[in-house]
Amino acid sequence: MLNKQILLYFASFLVILIAVMIFAPRSGYTPAGIKNVNVEEAKKMVEKDDVFVLDVRTPSEFNSSHVKGATLIPVTNASGSGLSPDNLLEARVDEVPKNKKILVYCRSGHRSVSASKILINAGYEQVYNMEGGINAWIAAGYPVEGSEKQ
């Protein structure tokens, strides 16, 4: 009887341990196919002009400040922007060229991971997530366009 209880406790412990390992957030985790780049690497990519720069923030955020040459396709209807689902990245993914590197950024780097996942799932292979987003870009002193030009 005691052995059955010990076995039951052990099995329960294993199930909980496996669940925690699967569902626990992993810092620094990047989904397969997405390459994280810092703002210095991103700036070099932009300067080479061999990348499609995708801003996935809201229109008001984009109008405030964005990387020169960036294309706006919001990933979510964040900050009450009132965008319909057909205006978001999942519906407009075909507007992103498949034959170029794609540099994705948002405000701080969270929405861009979601957008990068959408692109990878849609068959894109050269997806680069700019860590720290436009906040890190501006903090590094790199130029932006929009109403908050430097």
Image: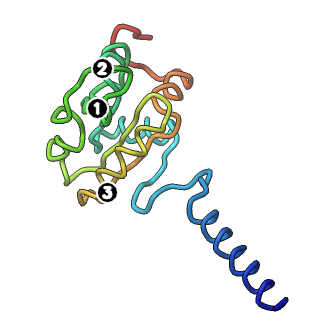
Q: Dot 3, how many residues are within 10 Å of its Cα: few (below 14), some (14-19), or many (20+)? A: some
How did the renderer colour the structure? rainbow
Please give left or right for residue 61 compared with residue 71 in the image: right
Q: Amino acid at mark 1?
A: Pro
Q: Amino acid at mark 2?
A: Ser
Residue position for label 3: 120
Which SS class for mark 3? helix
Picture quarter containing residue 147? top left
Say whether disc 1 or disc 3 marks the residue closer to the N-terminus. 1
Q: Say which of 122 and 19 sits in front.
A: 19
Residue position for label 1: 74
Residue position for label 2: 81
Residue that sits furthest to the top in the current view: 147
Please give left or right for residue 142 compared with residue 27 in the image: left
Whole-percent x, y for residue 108 in the image: 50, 31
Residues at marks 2 and 3, CA–CA distance in whole angstroms: 25 Å
Q: Quadrant of the N terminus?
A: bottom right
Query: What residue sits 38% from the left and 17% below the top?
Result: 65
Please give left or right for residue 45 compared with residue 10 in the image: left
